[in-house]
Amino acid sequence: MSWEIVAGVEVHVELSTNTKIFCGCANAFGAEPNTLICPVCTGMPGALPVLNRRVVEYALRAGLALDCDIARRTTFDRKNYFYPDLPKAYQISQLHLPICQNGWLEIETPTGSKRIGIRQIHMEEDAGKLIHHPTRPCTLVDYNRCGVPLLEIVSQPDFTAAHEVIAYLKSLREILLFLGVSDCKMQEGSLRVDLNVSVRHKGSGEQGIPTEMKNISSFQAVGRAMVWEGARQIQLLESGEEVLRETRRWDDGKNQGFVLRSKGGAEDYRYLPDPDLPILEITQEQVEQLRSTLPELPRNKRARYQREMGLSPQDARTLTASREVAALFEKTTALCQNPQEAANLIVGDLARLCTETATLPEDLQVDAAKLAALIVMIRSGKINRTVGKEVLEQIFFHDADPAVYVAQKGLAMVDDPALVEAAVRQVVEANPKSVSDYQNGKKKAFGYLVGQVMRSLKGKGDPALVNGILRELLEE
Amino acid sequence: MKIDAALLERLQDLSRIRLSEQERKDFQAGAALILDEISRLSHLELEEVSGRSSPSRCVNVFREDTVEPSTDQDAILAQAPDREGRYIRVFKTVEQGDEA
Ligand SMILES: [Zn+2]
């Protein structure tokens, strides 16, 4: 009988609020150790947490974008455990009444789209950062990250292939970026992925014993971890052994997982309602008000770009890979009224410049008005495409104004009929052999003569004008 | 309530504390007293109250997302038993294989 690997993921994202979840300390990455701490986020006796309003707003935005049911009443619980990253010895989280439940996210797979269930989204605080000394038996503790707001987004165990998990993670990241609730930087730990894997006989619908792998370093690594762990479990079961409920660590360099510990159940954490934090009540009006302010999400944008602007699926996908690029495309299109040209410029030469200079979408500083002006100049024949590339580079590197740059450098096409005619006459006079060749039926000679005219005009002759005038003179 | 050897073993694991034979005896006796005291709470009539219900009487108390100065850092760090620069230094407590 054949096996099926089943996986679910838990994604933790740090929210990009100004302050921590329960105190006014700045929420910032990379500060000097233990400078962003206060009695609340370090759990000093008597300190009281007060909830950051924006954390709730961000949780609701994520919940609405993922089609969740929003709780009318939600509360915080304490999750107790001893570890030096947690000065209170408990983490404030949500177990009993999470803010969002029962959502879903649709992903694209080679066999069509598939709905992945979102079991719940809850708010919690991040723990501090531990730096284990490589040789000495000591650990350095930095509490700056303590109390940074997190959303934990828990999927249903709906994945049966690694590419589905990767598609889900990419799509989820995209949505969170478009919502502006997190910067989702895996390398800075603001997006972290835990993977639960179990196996079962294909089509049996039974639930195997899952193992958990924490904090996997990239989306591709999540896929590799799922395949490896599934294979390990199948091998165990086929040789008559059991899968143990454990937490494991994925080592992507070694392409192998290692056991960390047997996994504790919820009862080991002695969850209890946090008496310091008031109950949260959310009204229908609040939910509807927030829903009306949600931005258009990437999936909908892609559909609209194809339907209304006639773009290819590939272009639509590239343009919606980040909020910044989509915004640039939409602004440029609105100004130049030419979505296809705007798309070509952005996914073509501009994307190439970004790659060459390792510029991330969020750092892209290009003025849509200047891109639009450039497109209008190319379309109207004021400059040719080669000059267009040069002008784009000037916009990209120096924020140059296309009209000013083209005028200063004399890059505009020569579209004055008198100037073109003068150049054509000179070439005709200087090349009697080619002229008679053409008149004797050698059509190739025409191309040569056009080339000569273009050369005398330094490549900037308006091709239509050059062709027309040359033909006229030769037919005389 | 009696703390048997198995429960004690589990508590040691969860709290990551290793007890000597004498400490185990003391703990079993002392903890039993505490648990007996706590068990008096089970005589309260709480059928109507869910274990999940919040004891808070307030609803919707928020702060705005505005940075305030982080206060008392030095006093907080002074509470740490050991330091290295601005870091707090503790014994290495690493799970096997979790050196990353
Ligand atoms: Zn604080």
Image: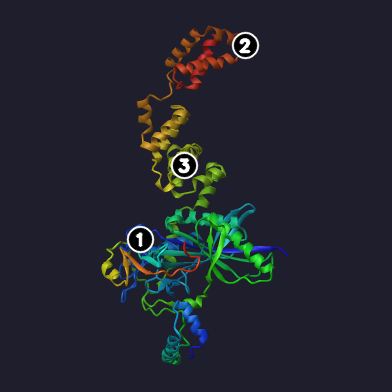
Question: Mark 2 sits on what residue?
Answer: A441
Residue under circle 3? Answer: A355
Report helix, strand or loop for mark 2: loop
Badge count: 3
Mark 3 beta carbon near ligand 1 (under 8 Å): no
In the foreground, A74 or A207: A207
Q: Amino acid at mark 2?
A: Gly
Q: Between A378 and A399, which is closer to the camera in this rendering?
A: A399
Residue contact between numbered discs 1 and 3, judged by CB atoms under 8 Å: no
Q: Quadrant of ligand 1?
A: bottom left
The tag earlier along the polypeptide, 1 or 2, is 1
Above or below, A15 relative to B47: above
Q: Residue at x 39, y 80 (%)?
A: B55
**Disc 2 + disc 3, Cβ < 8 Å:** no
| Same subunit: marks 1 and 3 | yes
Frontmost of labels 2 and 3 is 3
Q: Chain of mark 2?
A: A
Q: How dense is the environment of label 2, judged by Cα within 10 Å: few (below 14), some, or many (20 and up)?
A: few
Q: Alpha-carbon neighbours of circle 1 within 10 Å: few (<14), some, or many (≥20)?
A: many
Q: Nearer the viewer, residue A137 or B73?
A: A137
Residue at the far front in the pictured view = A135
Q: Amino acid at mark 3?
A: Thr
Residue occupying the point 73% across, 65% down: A1
Q: Secondary structure at mark 1?
A: loop
Q: Residue at x 35, y 71 (%)?
A: B61
Q: Which mark is residue A27?
A: 1
Above or below residue B15? Residue A283 is: above
Q: Position of residue A406 (x, y in %)?
A: 38, 28
Residue A275 coordinates in the image, percent (x, y): 38, 78
Task: Identify the residue at horizontal 60%, vertical 57% (top origin).
Answer: A162
